[in-house]
Image (spheres, coloured by chain):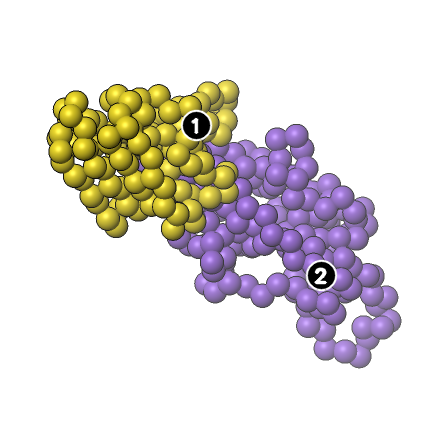
Amino acid sequence: MVSKSFTAEASPSAPAFSVPNPKLGKITKIEVDNHSTNGAITVMFKDRFTPDPSIGNPSPSQVERIRKVITVAQGGHFESNELEIPIYGDCFVEASRDDSDVSISMEYGME
Amino acid sequence: MFRLFVEPPELLKVGNLVKFVGDFTDEIKDGTILEAKKCVVVNFRKGFIVPANDRIEILLDNSTKGLKLYPTSTDTLYEILLGFKADGSFLMYPQFPAGHYPFRLDESTMYPEPDANDYRKYVGAFKPEDSPIDKPKLRTYTIKDLEPLVLEIANEGSDYGKLIVDFTINKVEFKKVPLPELEGYELIYREVIHPELMEW
């Protein structure tokens, strides 16, 4: 498992991690600490990928799936272990605002 | 053609004899017996993301859209084991030749129909758990100029699903065995049956 920590960003320019084509990614743990004085914050874990050409859609474009949404009250703490949140492509962690007083950490693996 | 085993099948080894059943190419006719003189295992893995209630076709041949898992030499055979790992609910339908589903039963309605909304969707379909990635039980062979082998993948789930396909490719180079050399021996050989002859 790989651990990663960062602060809340509304529009991160790079994914938190990317899953290679022949792998399945899984987020196994999420922690959010809201030490901010700016109120509650919402954090979304998004998966961006391009599906393979299919019979129904021979020319697919990139799609996005919201895999998990967490809202943490001001001063609050969220922690969840033993998760199995699938990620197929690029995992973006987007918050409802930029806030350096909100820390997010996650663990993920690839199979 | 694809064949599903109860246990992972053994790969061909140097010295094994192979008897071809059916006419494969101008050089490999029905009854041809060849001996494996070189075997090398090459692994390959690819992921496929399939939309909900949709299907994709995986071609194994060397065409532009194919995975290029066919030998380019007439004295080589690829013995391929396929193992799967899935996030989602998938059904897989072998085709040979393209567009034809050979796995069917005798009764006239018992043939695979992947886009049907009834029991025919489940006739002749493999599931990823039939041949897991760490214990592959699905085997096929490819030979130069053989028509494309196709594996049609249907996502039965309500959202996108990802299927990882692991290919264990045993590159087998043959030498011809003159028949006089085989006389007097009890021949133990692996039959490689032409895909068209596996349907009955």
Which residue is nearer to you in this view: B104 or B88? B88
Which colour represents chain B? Answer: purple
In x, y percent, where is residue B91?
Answer: 40, 42
Amino acid beneath label 1: Ala
Kind of element beneath mark 2? strand
Residue B87 is drawn in which quadrant? top left
Residue depicted at x 75% and y 53%: B76
Classify mark 2: residues with Cα within 10 Å, few (<14), some (14-19) or many (20+). Answer: many
Q: Residue A14's mark?
A: 1
Which colour represents chain A? Answer: yellow
Q: Are marks 1 and 2 on the same chain?
A: no
Residue at the spot of label 2 = B39
Q: In the figure, B67 relative to B34: above or below?
A: above
> Mark 1 falls within which chain?
A
In x, y percent, where is residue B186?
Answer: 72, 77
Q: Find the distance from the CA under tag 1 to the CA under tag 2.
A: 44 Å
Amino acid beneath label 2: Cys
Q: Is residue B94 visible?
A: no
